[in-house]
Image: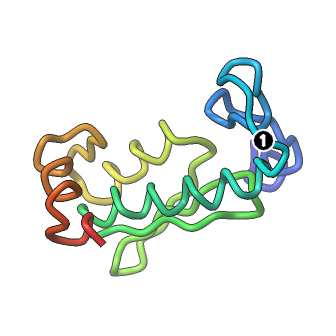
């Protein structure tokens, strides 16, 4: 399936709490899919920044994973973001990597921004 057809499909992922509120407990009415996506983008970029990458939102339905040199891959959901990051960098990009978690906690390096 091409990226445009995938985008038009608009299928929600299980991690989108605004689209699946019964699975994540009650949320206020100000909790929207768009706001949730913005919050998720900030967190994702803290993580992938540790690997020298950035992620941007594409029409609220996909993620664009980029390296500093311009290498780019599309991802439909979070699990695909990590796969794309690993493909671009040529090494494992694990959001649970102890070095990454230390960098975020201490505020050191790109992940601590």
In front: 49, or 38?
38
Q: Residue 64 in the image: x percent, y percent?
A: 56, 63
Q: Residue 24 in the image: x percent, y percent?
A: 65, 24
In front: 30, or 80?
30
Residue found 57% across the figure and 67% down from its top: 56
Name above or below for residue 83 compared with residue 68: above
User: In this figure, what is the number of numbered marks?
Assistant: 1
Badge 1 is on which residue? Answer: 28
Residue found 78% across the figure and 45% down from its top: 6
Label 1 element class: loop
Name above or below for residue 13 compared with residue 54: above
Residue found 14% across the figure and 69% down from its top: 108
In front: 55, or 39?
39
Asked if residue 30 lies left or right of residue 64, the reply is right
Q: Residue 38 in the image: x percent, y percent?
A: 63, 61
Name above or below for residue 100 compared with residue 73: above
Q: Which residue of the protein is positioned furthest toward the bottom in this rendering?
A: 69
Q: Quadrant of the N terminus?
A: top right
Asked if residue 24 lies left or right of residue 98, the reply is right
Residue found 11% across the figure and 49% down from its top: 99
């Amino acid at each position: 399936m091409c990226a445009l057809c995938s985008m038009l499909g608009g299928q929600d992922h299980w991690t989108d709490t605004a689209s699946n509120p019964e699975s994540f407990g009650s949320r206020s009415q100000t909790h929207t899919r768009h706001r949730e996506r913005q919050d998720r983008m900030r967190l994702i970029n803290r993580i992938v920044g540790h690997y020298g990458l950035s992620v941007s939102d594409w029409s609220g339905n996909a993620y664009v994973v980029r390296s500093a040199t311009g290498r780019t891959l599309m991802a439909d959901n979070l699990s695909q973001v990590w796969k794309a990051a690993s493909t671009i960098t040529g090494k494992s990009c694990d959001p649970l990597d102890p070095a990454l978690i230390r960098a975020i906690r201490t505020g050191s390096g790109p992940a601590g921004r």
